[in-house]
Amino acid sequence: MAVSTGAYIRLVGVARTYEATRPVEALKDCHLEVLPGEFATVMGPSGSGKSTLLNVIGLLDRPTAGVYWLNDEDTSRLDERARTRLRASALGFVFQAFHLISHRSALENVELGLVHRGVQRRERMARAEAALVAVGLEHRLGALPSTLSGGEQQRVAIARAIAGRPLALLCDEPTGNLDSRATDALMALFHQLNSTGLTVVIVTHNRAVAEGSDRVILVRDGMVTPDRLVGR
Ligand code: ADP
Ligand code: MG
């Protein structure tokens, strides 16, 4: 699955405050750049703002201050429709919970992910199959999620994400439900996808996942420290 160029992600002074009983500053004055084709991991304690950061990058959430540029587009200028369109065309998501439809086959789960993108059925089936081949599940196209291992279910979720031909893959604790062997296999897959030019951003608690990435972005109390390398 060739990708011409990955996404270029740039956050300038981004903050996100939640209006709860009292305001929660989940992100404060964040400056961050992820280059096209980069493999970045995001680490930090629980509650530090990692998911909020990924949701902002994924256009699932809006900053309350600052500007998020995606491929040189100022996303703060986009209305909801344009954000949804950009999200669908540029971004793929993988979460800790696989979020597969239990009574649908692997192929159908991936194919259904393309329906709202307006892709015709024949093309959807072809792309879904190619994506499942790309993640090494060509022998399980008709399998229901319950008959797949955790690692295989996550591969279906990854296939669903890449079938949309994104420029960036955004993953929130994708190996959180997997054992170390399945984790290693999944990381090899992420690196293989990255080698085609896809930008990859992975939130993780697992140092083994962070090792081998181009850079580690540390998040602490809503603030990012972008350029510290693992082992320094
Ligand atoms: P992490 O992913 O690093 O565990 P989060 O980004 O989920 O952290 O959360 C960062 C902070 O924002 C935490 O204090 C959390 O309680 C708070 N928070 C997250 N989502 C909401 C929300 N919808 N409403 C209010 N507070 C929230
Ligand atoms: Mg989180």
Image (cartoon, rainbow, N blue to C red):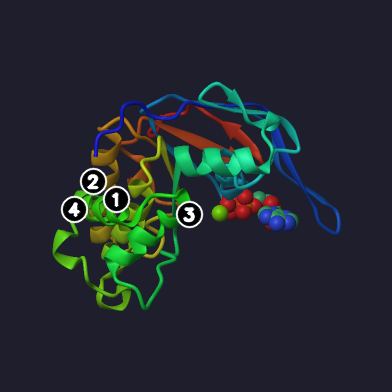
List the residue tagged with mark 4. 133
Q: Residue at x 55, y 41 (%)?
A: 85
Q: Amino acid at mark 2?
A: Ala
Label 4 vs 1, first from the N-terminus: 1
- Dot 1: element: helix
**Dot 4 and dot 1 residues touching (CB under 8 Å):** no
Q: Where ligand 2 lies, by quadrant?
A: bottom right
Give the farthest residue toward the top: 72
Against 76, residue 53 (above or below) is below
List the residue tagged with mark 2. 188
Label 4 vs 2, first from the N-terminus: 4
Q: Is residue 83 left or right of residue 91?
A: right
Q: Amino acid at mark 3?
A: His
C-alpha separation, residue under disc 4 versus residue under disc 2:
15 Å
C-alpha separation, residue under disc 1 versus residue under disc 3:
13 Å
Label 1 vs 3, first from the N-terminus: 3
For disc 3, the neighbor class at 10 Å (few under 14, some 14 to 19, many from 20) is: few
For disc 2, the neighbor class at 10 Å (few under 14, some 14 to 19, many from 20) is: some
Number of marks in the image? 4
Label 2 vs 3, first from the N-terminus: 3
**Ligand 2 closer than 8 Å to label 4 CB:** no
* In the foreground, 232 or 137: 137
